[in-house]
Structure formats: C-alpha cells, structure tokens
Image: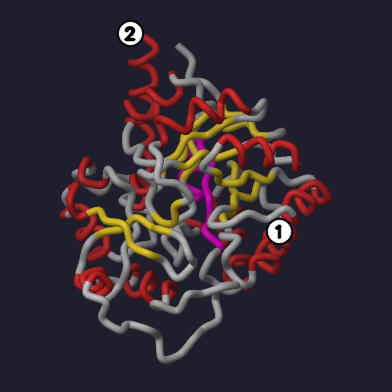
C-alpha cells in the first residue's frame, strides 16, 4: 500500500506532512532538515530572527539534507519583506506565511519561481489566495498553536476549503499522531501540517524546561491569550499568563520594533524567547490544543514512523 505524496508546484514530498514553522528558534535547521530527510517538508521559522541568521539557517539545512526546505515568515513582522527576499535569494523551496495576509508575496514568488503557501482560516481567503497565485493553502483551525485567524474547528473549515479551491489543501490544527494524519487525508486533504508534535521532538530548538512544561500540560492548561499582534493565540497557562488574566501591567520598558503594528500589552518576542530559552515562568509558550495527548519527546524519525504506520493502517481498514 502506497503512502500518498504531497505535490506543491514542482515539489514532491514523499510523506504528506509539513512541519509547522515555530518562531523564536524552535523550528531551525536541525529540525527542518530532519523532517526533510524523512520525506516531509521541513520549515525554518524566520520570524523573530535577524536576516543574517535566517540565511545561515537555510544554508545549514541545505548542508544537512537534499530534501524540501521552506521558510515560514509571519506577515506581521516588521522585516517581512527583507526576510522573504533573503530566503528567495537563498533559493528556498517554498514560502509559508500567516498572521496576516500579503498580496505582494505572491508576486515575489511568481517572479522567482518559488511556491507561496499562505495559512488561511476560511474558504473565502483560500479562494482569494488561489486567485493571487498560491501554490497551495494551509488551512488552520482554532486547535492550532500560536496566532489564530478563526474560532472555528479545523474539522468544520477543512471541507469548505477543499470544495472551494483547485490547489492542494493542507490541514492544520491539533494533529499529533499518525491516526490524525490518516483521518485528515481521508477527509480529502492533500497533506497535514503538524507543529506541536515536532516542537516536542529531539531536534526541536526549544529548551528542555520548555519541553518538560509542555509534557506536563493538561487539556485545561491550554488557553487563549490576546497577542500584541492583534490576534488571539493559543498557549500554555503559566505565571505570565496569570499576570495577563489579572490585568497586571507587563508592558515593555523598551521596544524592539519587531512588529509592523503592536498593541503594546506585552512584548511577544521577548516573552517567547524567554520560554524557548527555558524561563517557563515568565515566558510565553505557544501550543496546539491537543498537547496533552503527547506523552514523550521523540526523534523526528520516530514521529515519522508513527505517521507512516497510521496512514498505512487506515488504508488497510
């Protein structure tokens, strides 16, 4: 029984899985390259790092693998255009972008012959993306970790998007094992994006304390916060989120100017970095809704073995 391939433009992933682009140095070259080596699409997160660092990570990933390597850059970051053009100069395989919507990126991608894949949360935005030249769309539901563009479940949105467009559709939000991947493909998706499961991999760039905090999280520990980006986001309850709930003033004394527009209720980059480096009390930990189902940190290879087993067992039933 053959596992279905994921085709995006001229790219062919042997396993129909994209690794989510998790910012502030969680999704870097070691993780992206390991995913690409297994036949999936590895993603380097370009948000929250300097242009020079993104270039270095792309080159390191290329050194480690001949597989498919993309970048994920949030539209909300101030250096969006500079980061995208730097990635394109490095001949990245594809661009993924969310947390806002850029029409320009489709033009840039067309000019350079690089597929552009936006993250969308509605059939309307998926249709617009296809019209503008998207090579595929990643459809994200409310179960996804990080910034959210909807309050609807992926299970409700996905069929609507599949019916609305003629480009590949990748489901995202709360998928953590091979069974989830198999079920999503069964619904008609061309592929699946997984973030939190790969965040809890050996190759993830997160600190051990960050991973341990995620593994301890219960279903009730996953909460919504209001991000300075101007969107809701999904993460893990901790001391910092309690301060937000209690309306304690946590406004930054110094602004790094990382976002195009910032509500200033707290500094999201510094709080995400704190957590990624191991300060799980004062930092912010983004997480998908089903993190409580993950019981251990696995290697990327072990995660893919589970994915392949799930897809094949579903096909045999």
Distance between the alpha carbons at the discs numbered 2 and 1: 44 Å
For residue 50, which numbered disc appears in the image?
none
Residue 109: x, y in percent?
76, 49
Task: Determine which residue is flagged by label 2.
Answer: 317
Describe residue 114's horizontal placement relative to residue 55 as left or right. Answer: right
Q: Residue at x 60, y 53 (%)?
A: 62
Q: Residue at x 42, y 26 (%)?
A: 184
Residue 201: x, y in percent?
33, 50
Task: Determine which residue is flagged by label 1.
Answer: 90
Residues at marks 2 and 1 touching, judged by CB atoms closer than 8 Å: no
Location of residue 133 by image quarter:
top right
Residues shaded magenta: 32-46
- Residue 228 vs 249, above or below: the answer is above
SS state under label 2: loop
Specify which label sits upstream in the sequence, 2 or 1.
1
SS state under label 1: loop
- Residue 222 vs 190, above or below: the answer is below
């Amino acid at each position: 029984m053959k596992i279905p391939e994921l085709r995006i433009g001229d790219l062919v992933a042997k396993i129909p899985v994209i690794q989510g682009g998790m910012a502030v140095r969680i999704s870097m070259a070691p993780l992206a390259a390991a995913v690409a080596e297994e036949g999936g699409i590895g993603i380097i997160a370009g948000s929250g790092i300097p242009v020079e660092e993104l270039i270095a990570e792309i080159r390191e990933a290329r050194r480690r693998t001949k597989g498919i390597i993309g970048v994920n850059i949030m539209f909300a970051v101030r250096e969006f255009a500079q980061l995208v053009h730097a990635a394109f100069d490095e001949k990245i395989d594809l661009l993924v972008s969310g947390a806002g919507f850029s029409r320009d990126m489709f033009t840039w991608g067309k000019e350079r012959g690089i597929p552009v894949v936006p993250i969308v949360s509605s059939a309307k935005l998926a249709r617009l993306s296809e019209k503008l030249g998207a090579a595929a769309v990643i459809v994200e539901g409310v179960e996804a970790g990080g910034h959210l563009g909807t309050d609807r479940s992926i299970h409700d949105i996905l069929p609507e998007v599949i019916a609305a467009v003629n480009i590949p559709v990748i489901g995202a939000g709360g998928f953590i094992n091979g069974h989830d991947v198999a079920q999503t493909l069964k619904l008609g998706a061309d592929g699946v994006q997984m973030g939190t499961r790969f965040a809890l991999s050996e190759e993830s760039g997160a600190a051990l304390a960050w991973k341990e905090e995620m593994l301890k999280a219960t279903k009730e520990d996953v909460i919504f916060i209001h991000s300075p980006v101007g969107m809701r986001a999904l993460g893990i309850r901790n001391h910092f989120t309690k301060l937000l709930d209690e309306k304690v003033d946590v406004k930054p004394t110094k602004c790094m100017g990382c976002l195009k527009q910032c509500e200033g209720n707290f500094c999201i980059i510094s709080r995400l970095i704190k957590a990624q480096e191991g300060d799980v009390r004062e930092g912010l930990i983004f997480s998908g809704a089903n993190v409580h189902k993950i019981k251990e940190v696995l290697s990327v290879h072990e995660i893919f073995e589970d994915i392949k087993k799930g897809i094949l067992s579903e096909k045999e039933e």
